[in-house]
Image (cartoon, rainbow, N blue to C red):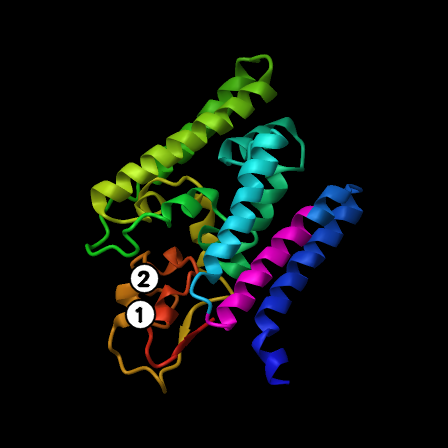
Amino acid sequence: MKILKNYTGPLVMFLVFEAIAVTLWLTMDNLFYLFNFSYIGMSIAIGLALFENKYIHARRVTQLLVGLYMLVYLGLICNENMQIEGFWYYLFSGVFEAATIHYAVAKIFGPFVFGRGWCGYACWTAMVLDLLPYKRSLEERKKWGFLRYITFGLSLVFVAALFLLNVGNKERIMFWSFLIGNALYYLTGISLALALQDNRAFCKYICPVTVFLKPASYFSLLRVKVDKSKCVSCGSCSRACPMNVDIMDPSRKRKNGTECILCMECAAACKKDAIRF
């Protein structure tokens, strides 16, 4: 019974994604969706199970399993633009598949359940940025959050212009925009991380996807919580957070509350084992 209790979280997460996989498979009549979401659910469950066993690189395992799958297989091999431009492209094309389904599950409706877990466990940009040496910011967050709305707007305008101007060979353009976009993301993300000594600076200030993620994350069912009976108010958890979230405040209005990526660095820093999902 104790073993079953320890793996309840991973099992539930796998079953959630399996339900999505089966539903999309049957409704879209496409076996790909069964494989796609089953694989992602299994990858997340493996990471969570490793976390339960105190493996320090548990989240990195899931990041690599999901991030490389989406970047290399879906993006480079299948020529799917999984960046935000791909979402706009399929949306304007009137096609509900690929990037639109991905965004609906992971970044629009999914965050009502698992918040910004995408950012912590699946993002292929963060997968690389998290390898840099600046695991947690030593300075207060800068007031640059408005930049994400600029990049969000630019991505929308770019794709809208392709349709309004009736540009030909859009699919090829979208593939090249995926390659160039990723290169720019990595270049900008690494440069910001080095300049600000903060691996997650790109996520905090530039990433356009957070425009979708932040509002839903406020209502997320899955949240990091502190057991007040164990907590000694040492502040180690908040200092360890790469997103500058005030972990010790249990309210949804806590400082940078919608920035939590469920990375559980706070739990790793807590000496009293007072932090759980």
Q: Is residue 39 above or below residue 167?
A: below
Among all residues in the image, which is located at the extreme left?
A: 139
Q: Is residue 87 at least partly visible in the picture? A: yes
The amino acid type, in three-letter code, at marker 2 is Cys
Q: Is residue 113 above or below residue 39?
A: below
Please name the residue that numbered disc 2 is placed on.
241
- What residue is drawn where x is 80% and y is 48%? 26
Q: Is residue 145 above or below residue 215?
A: above
Query: Which image quadrant is residue 80 in?
Result: top right
Q: Position of residue 199 (x, y in %)?
A: 31, 48
Q: Quadrant of the N terminus?
A: bottom right
Q: Position of residue 254 (x, y in %)?
A: 33, 65
Looking at the rendering, the stretch of residues picked out in magenta corresponds to 36-54
Q: Label 2: how many residues lie within 10 Å, few (<14), some (14-19) or many (20+)?
A: many
In the drawing, what numbered circle is on residue 98?
Answer: none
Left or right: where 186 falls relative to 60 = left
Q: Is residue 117 at least partly visible in the picture? A: no
Q: Label 1: how many residues lie within 10 Å, few (<14), some (14-19) or many (20+)?
A: many
Query: Which image quadrant is residue 12 in?
Result: bottom right
Left or right: where 232 falls relative to 74 = left
Would you say the magenta stretch is mainly helix, strand or loop?
A: helix
Q: Position of residue 135 (x, y in %)?
A: 30, 55
- What residue is drawn where x is 33% and y is 75%? 270
The amino acid type, in three-letter code, at marker 1 is Cys
Please name the residue that numbered disc 1 is placed on.
237
- What residue is drawn where x is 32% and y is 57%? 242
Q: Position of residue 51 (x, y in %)?
A: 49, 68
- Under circle 2, the secondary element is loop
> In the rendered structure, does residue 45 fall within the stretch colored magenta?
yes
* Labelled pair 2, 1 in contact (Cβ < 8 Å): yes
